[in-house]
Image (tube, coloured by chain):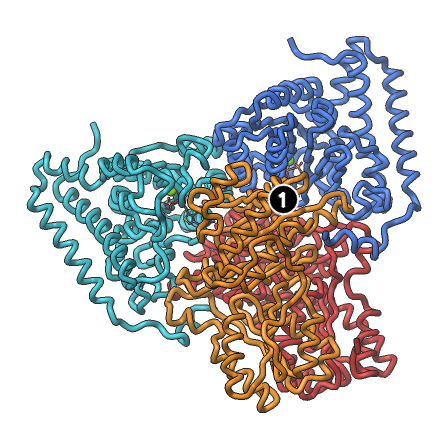
Chain colours: A red, B orange, C cyan, D blue
Amino acid sequence: MAEITFLQAINEAMSEEMRANKNVVLIGEDIGIYGGCFGASRGMLEEFGTDQMLETPISEEGFMDLAMGASMIGMRPIVEIMFGDFSTLVSDGLINHAAKYKFMTGGQVEVPLVFRAPFGSGTGAAAQHSQSLETMFTNTPGLKIVYPATPYDAKGLLKSAIRDNGPVLFFENKLLYRAKGEVPEGDYTIEIGKADIKREGTDVSIITYSRMLPVCLEAAEQLAAEGISAEVVDLRSLKPLDTETIIKSVMKTSRALVVHEAPKFGGFAGEVVAAIMESEAFYHLDAPVARLGGKEMPVPYNPDIEKQIVPVIDDVKETVRKLVNNGGVKV
Amino acid sequence: MAEITFLQAINEAMSEEMRANKNVVLIGEDIGIYGGCFGASRGMLEEFGTDQMLETPISEEGFMDLAMGASMIGMRPIVEIMFGDFSTLVSDGLINHAAKYKFMTGGQVEVPLVFRAPFGSGTGAAAQHSQSLETMFTNTPGLKIVYPATPYDAKGLLKSAIRDNGPVLFFENKLLYRAKGEVPEGDYTIEIGKADIKREGTDVSIITYSRMLPVCLEAAEQLAAEGISAEVVDLRSLKPLDTETIIKSVMKTSRALVVHEAPKFGGFAGEVVAAIMESEAFYHLDAPVARLGGKEMPVPYNPDIEKQIVPVIDDVKETVRKLVNNGGVKV
Amino acid sequence: MAFEFGKKQSLETMKLMLTSRRFEEKVNEMFMQGLIHGTTHLGIGQEALHAGVSPALDKDDWILPNHRGHGHCIAKGSTPYDIMAELMAIRDGVCKGMGGSMHIIDTRYKNMGSSGIVGSAIPMAVGMALQMKREGRKNVVCTMFGDAASNRGTFHEALNMASIWKVPSLFLCENNLYGMSVPAKYSVSVEDIAVRATSYNMESRVIDGNDVELVYSTVKEITDSMRMNPRPFLLEAKTYRWLGHSKSDRREYRTKEEEAEWKERCPISMFKDKMIDRGFITEKAFEKMKADVEAEIDAATEACKGKERVSLNEAFDYVYSS
Amino acid sequence: MAFEFGKKQSLETMKLMLTSRRFEEKVNEMFMQGLIHGTTHLGIGQEALHAGVSPALDKDDWILPNHRGHGHCIAKGSTPYDIMAELMAIRDGVCKGMGGSMHIIDTRYKNMGSSGIVGSAIPMAVGMALQMKREGRKNVVCTMFGDAASNRGTFHEALNMASIWKVPSLFLCENNLYGMSVPAKYSVSVEDIAVRATSYNMESRVIDGNDVELVYSTVKEITDSMRMNPRPFLLEAKTYRWLGHSKSDRREYRTKEEEAEWKERCPISMFKDKMIDRGFITEKAFEKMKADVEAEIDAATEACKGKERVSLNEAFDYVYSS
Ligand SMILES: Cc1ncc(C[n+]2csc(CCOP(=O)(O)OP(=O)(O)O)c2C)c(N)n1
Ligand SMILES: Cc1ncc(C[n+]2csc(CCOP(=O)(O)OP(=O)(O)O)c2C)c(N)n1
Ligand SMILES: [Mg+2]
Ligand SMILES: [Mg+2]
């Protein structure tokens, strides 16, 4: 199997689906000759032309609504937004329209739309170009949300997203774009709503997604040297959430830590903690479930601080050690 | 003390602050002669004139950004949005601008802006006029969020919000607008970030806010007849969250239920559950913390279903009984 | 010479206008009686648009009326029963009772309905027109919106995109002089919204929106031309809503005199006078038509009463796709 | 007759243009050397706007440049050190290193800076102009934005509000023919963005943005008039950015010929030629001025190196207010 980058995996998924179905159309800013701000569509204009590559003006709200309209009568748009931070500009199209039209029309229409957005800090792009805004959408019935961490998962999930007949939010993390991984060349899909155990372990479940996956895997590796066996659960989909896999893992390990890049307060980890709390796994807990997330601060330009506000390997290790050794983080 | 409605309390808070400071300006649609869609500003145009009552075109994103700009050089705008569902249209102004400008400028500016939005279902207004979208904002560092449930709290918190030098989101619930309560006539404030025990109890803590408060209080009343003593904690502020009061209450009762109107999945209750989990209260729990929230569905026009998708008194009672009797909701 | 309908079309057009008028009156009554819940925005006074636009379109052209659009929905094909059923939230409603008045969508008749978010259907319509163009169809999309909606950013973004991609999208601004309570003269910085087409290198026109023959012939002329040579067009129709914005409106923002003036320009009476002049109808026949329409709508309304509603479990089926 | 600067102002203007140019060149070099992180948008080629706009304004007028605005910031009062310090993320930066290149804000000089969300500063500027009008000040607000930004809905909403409330807001569209890679001719449906003022019953004008005297005199004339009679104005300046959109741009979307043509129209050389003609400067004096500017910027840059940065704990102070 070939090793390709996360970006190439996205490019392949889109290209294969666009080849198979002329109604799959990529919509976004500077996606043509420029190949997209991060290069996800590099080289695609030549093959797909302007009919399947709709390069837009800077009109995020407008082109999201446009895509939503087109999707109801046959188009299967993939809307790329240049920075996930601009999710604010398309939140009306997603929350008030895409998520609701099938419902509001009593099932008369489907909205087969994919929204792709790069999130995350670590590039020195400061407060308005570095956020992780998944929680703007996780509380909206009608939306599916995936957030893959590896090239393999990205390709398979993006294909599923494109084939799904409802709106799917496909979140990407800029720092993962150049990460490489093995990806089959042809067609395959990954079911939306299924978590994946990226590393098996017995002492603690580290539950995470996206950019925090490599951080947690590395922490798990280092913890192994200390004799702590950590299982790493990659959620991959946030909505629907694979509570079954989470619960099974926590029942096995009796301890859990949830990790994400977005600010801890109000972050998605709360949902995961509550899901564990509501399940049988609660009765198996040897320590309270812990959370690690970003600090309560916009992302600064100052690179020293930028590095300090998201969880790092040492944070994960330290928290896991506390969970395993003292049975929990006493306050 | 006079009994006034929630709407009147808002009207009083705004009027008193606008009288005291000419830079407090109400900005929104149909707030003038019409008095606002729900009547919050009825009668105010006469006293305050167009200088302090800025009636806008249908340009939500624009007037939010406008208010944000003005706020940095002396205005203290109160931005009213007609339906909280249109939060999507102003999320860029709030999340990418108001929340970040003090930070991004290294403290050069303050953004003393209040955002008022009516949330909630129960009026037959269907999917795009009935949501509770607080979680669009709870994960944004830089924003304060209050969500009062009584006229007294509304007036005191709105005054604090107006006097706060940073952006404060003041959420209202349409079904509470006509609710009456005792409210002092003159000036008083309520500190942002302080929860309030609305009913003392010893067996279980029901933690809630906004429209679910009367539901939980009534449930507590009825449970008392069954010999169950429920404490009802009204969060009032979601951000900052008064974890101290929550923890104290749960340590006392050993059981907790979190209730809100917004959909349960991804809702704010997750944060509350996680906060309890991370505290000493965890070690005192006699049952897992339970959550009640809206069903995974947009709000339908069909009034029969509309009633069934938010928690009602019986749901609260039933969940509390399970918590108290069997020590938790086994799955 | 101004375009004139023949007798048959005159009678059909009048019937449509009367149906729209009576339907809204009935909805108003039902509200007063507490038989319909929620809110509604009635189109009384704007019937020339209802009866003039959709009949001028092809069956396969799409419309996206705004929140004040019951009349358009009927003109495009839905029956009064279909819509009344929706307002009464029964299973037979066009949207199975899930959408209500602000979201009457009937895809059988190529009606993609209104968004409750004022102005957001404008770019949606551009997307639909684009997809139809991609598919090589000769169809147009007509989206209706108010004077106040023309102040939304979506209007600007949509018209710009429609222009650069030359999509067959007819932007029909129903300028009834008011938003909810705010007069267009205070919220819209220009007298004629049609001039805003200049910003997009787009053609535009202003017409009397209460003259049903003018509305029809203008829409026909423009859309015929758009089919041959795909491009967008901004059409502004001046009109007036007689009633309040929605059920709770006390109309303190305008004068009784202004209302009376516009009632003088009732689209139905004006067209009726022409029909009588032309010998197409008599007073008596007109009254008969009115009574028939009334009876039809009453019957449709009665037929809704007590009918079954969708259940919670069924409603879950509409939330997600697969 | 065209407006001409006297000798003193010519020398000052030239110094500003050279400072802007050299500052950007230095930033570019520092990026290549990895001494600045993140990204940046350089304004080389647009110096006539930098040196022509702010000097034409009053000290207490506000500006809101866009992301390509270092030169404007310097022209309004910040020193190269202030800005370089921000780019190097040290405590001495105008925003204490919290904002970076996209958010250079310096309230000491009434510079409210750019928003990284293209087009969102346009309504912010209207709000500021409104507040100044409320306070009875005779000041204006000038917001700069690109051709591509004029397609955002915020442009439309802001200009409409500015017009209905008659606020003294100068909307300066720096049309450099491209967004990031998309040519304005494909994304903006009109040739001259200035015509979009028609939609708001607003005055407008198109000028050569590379002619610093024309820029200065136009801004002066318009803002003087706006002070007397508060109202908005849309000014479009045609110009060109010589370098890529941001550091990673390979510029495959335009030709080397086009770039060469515009370099012929370099605002600095064109003005230098005039100055030599008018006897205001010699080649030698010009070279000396360039060298001085270079030395000044080098010194400012050196002074930034190794300086202290704000700590995490301090940064928390900027998150919330009380
Ligand atoms: C984005 C948005 N803002 C505000 C509203 C509330 N609202 C509904 S209709 C309306 C007035 C619309 O006026 P106009 O566009 O002229 O249409 P008309 O009602 O006159 O037909 C308002 C303010 C809304 N539904 N959506
Ligand atoms: C709302 C938004 N969309 C997209 C971007 C990414 N972006 C930054 S600058 C830019 C091009 C802006 O072009 P223009 O407005 O003409 O200004 P110029 O860069 O040419 O000065 C783009 C697409 C952004 N920052 N904000
Ligand atoms: Mg109107
Ligand atoms: Mg440009």
Q: Quadrant of the C terminus of chain B?
A: bottom right
Going by the numbered disc 1, the residue's amino acid type is Arg
At a point 36% along the width and 57% down the height, the residue shown is: C39
Residue D113 in percent (x, y) is at 71, 38
Placement of A296 over or under B42, stated as above or below: below
Residue furthest bottom as drawn:
B326
Q: Nearer the viewer, residue A42 or C211?
A: C211
Q: Residue A211 lies in what quarter of the image?
A: bottom right
Q: Residue B280 lies in what quarter of the image?
A: bottom right
Residue D308 in percent (x, y) is at 90, 48
Label 1 marks a residue whose chain is B
Decide if residue C26 is on the left or right side of residue A162: left
Indicate if the residue with disc 1 has its beta carbon within 8 Å of ligand 1.
no
Q: Nearer the viewer, residue C52 or C266?
A: C266
Q: Nearer the viewer, residue D251 or C55?
A: C55
Q: Which residue is mark 1?
A: B76
Placement of B211 over or under D307, stated as above or below: below
Considering the numbered disc 1 on the image, is that residue within a helix, a strand or a loop?
A: strand
Q: Nearer the viewer, residue A139 or D294?
A: A139
